[in-house]
Amino acid sequence: MTAAAMLSPATRGSAPPTLGAELESLADRLKQMTVRIHSRGDRFDGVGAGVLWPYREQSIVVTNAHVVPARRSDAVVVEDRERRVVTARVLARDVERDLAILSLPELPDEWPVPAPLGDAAGLRVGEIVVALGHPFGVAGALSLGVLHAALAADDRWLQADIRLAPGNSGGPLATVDGAVIGINAMIVRGLGIAVPASAARAFVAQVLGAPNEHAA
Amino acid sequence: MSPSSAPLASASKDPSTLRALSDDLAGAVERAGRSIVAIHARPRIPASGIYWRGDIIVAASHTVRRDQDISILLPDGSRGRAQLVGRDGGTDVAVLRLDNPPSSAAVVAADLAPDDALRVGALVLAVGRPGERVSASLGVISAVGERWRTWSGGDIDRFVRLDLNVYDGFSGGPLVDADGRVLGMNCSALARGAPLTVPNATIERVVDALLTRGHVARAYLGVAMQPVRLTRSVAERLQLGEAPRGVLVVMVESDSPADRAGLLVGDVILAAAGTPVGEPQEVAELLGAEDVGASLELSVVRGAERRAVAVTIGERQAGSDAKRRGRDS
């Protein structure tokens, strides 16, 4: 089926699920895995996002270094889509890579499951990508774009042609399948720039140990 | 490595419309990429170009700052050399000729979409090669209009405005549809940085003109003008009505059609070919390549007297593009 055929009104009504319904469901899945981060320091209050990151049985959040306070002792509050609030601790912070890991010691009963991770290395230029975040404080907003450039092995950043704003920082960049391929970090000349999920995964492994090290 | 033993939301791998669309778009970029080259003919980042046919590459004229021994990075990763055949500053189309036509199967001449593929709302990609790799942006065609004339006198078959980001180095690259067919050449220099596409029909016309004649015929008068309002007393004396507009001649090129017709600096042109004019652009719009040699009747105010001046429209000589500045016609 060609893209033109899929978008034409004739096929839209007769072949559910529609593109719109699929995007809605994708947005819903991204909202599940995205948290809002409040710092007690007033500078970053309420503008940051984070991703519920899979790591053994632990509950951690991966976000940008620039959305959490510099001092480890500073309290951070993490809020899920249902506005359930958890106090988190900054486990590690790497300003160079713009990554931070938060640990969530005590969780409410109904806490969302972590995000599925993908790998941007295999993605093709032009593939659709989506971002979820809280641009300018608007909670749970979806943006849609495409992968701008293929990720080479030595690339530190992932480039997406997608509209981001302050408040998307720390939130997920994902494929149409809902797999997280990056942590949105900044906007450079209109391009969305994300930390590749592979780099975030490596950072988590470096700080907490490889996920399967003590598995047996 | 298994990321976690914790329960995981799974990425959906079901066949879906969204996945199919995403694959189509990536496929379109891949196909179009086989015709997109990087052109090293200016400082800093390279610009993009389209491998048009045979040994011909189409590029955005404003990105080609040299005429000879231009280094081209071909889609298969090999490097070639090209020479400038000619350029048309009016449409921003430049034509380069490769010293050796590409032999690799990974380099394919642009697959041109028919003109009726230019439709408002069509999902399109701008694709460029501002370096070794292809990059893309997604958007829609936001407006399609009639034939128009650019500020620099170029004749463009359709007005095609885009709602998408044209990034650094994208000028000269193609606009492609969701099937990867080329709809035209993207350019940010024709409308104050707003992303526009020069349609295939215009490119074909300019390529043919540059290959056969080395330049694109362009009508000109040899004057620089600016908008002006006449005073009420002059308007009353000449019975021109309220707040009459015109264009003031601020420069007349020596031996130009305007000079030969006796037009002087300080003349105020009120109408051309019977059409009232208040902006230099309105005069420029009356000058098509097909009008070269024809007579243009100007209604002029000189020394508070009204008179008619007939100018025989001339043809601008090739090579004068670089010297042109601002709003002359």
Image: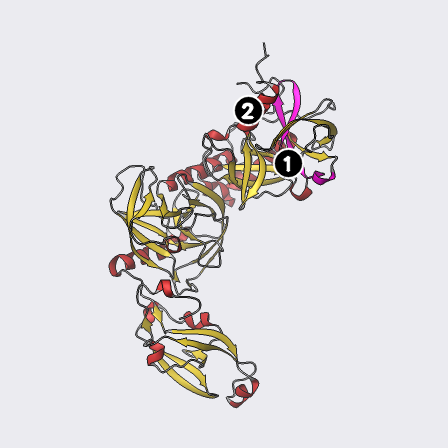
- Which is nearer the eye, B204 or B302? B302
Q: Give the x, y percent position of residue A131.
A: 58, 37
Looking at the rendered structure, whether the residues under marks 2 and 1 are on a common chain is answered as: yes
Picture disc at residue B154 = none
What is the residue that sits farthest to the bottom in this orientation?
B237
Q: Give the x, y percent position of residue A101.
A: 64, 27
Res. A1 in view: no
Circle 2 residues within 10 Å: few <14, some 14–19, many ≥20? few
Q: Which residue is mark 1?
A: A66
Proximity of marks 2 and 1: CB atoms separated by less than 8 Å = no
Specify the amino acid type for callout 2. Ala
Q: Which residue is mark 2?
A: A202
Q: Which residues are magenta?
A: A42-63
Q: Give the x, y percent position of residue B199.
A: 39, 54
Q: Chain of mark 2?
A: A
When the figure is inspected, residue A105 is found, relative to residue B77, above or below; the finding is above
* For residue A24, side relative to residue B300 (left or right): right
Residue at left offset 66%, top offset 36%: A67
Quarter residue B86 falls in: bottom left
Specify the amino acid type for callout 1. His
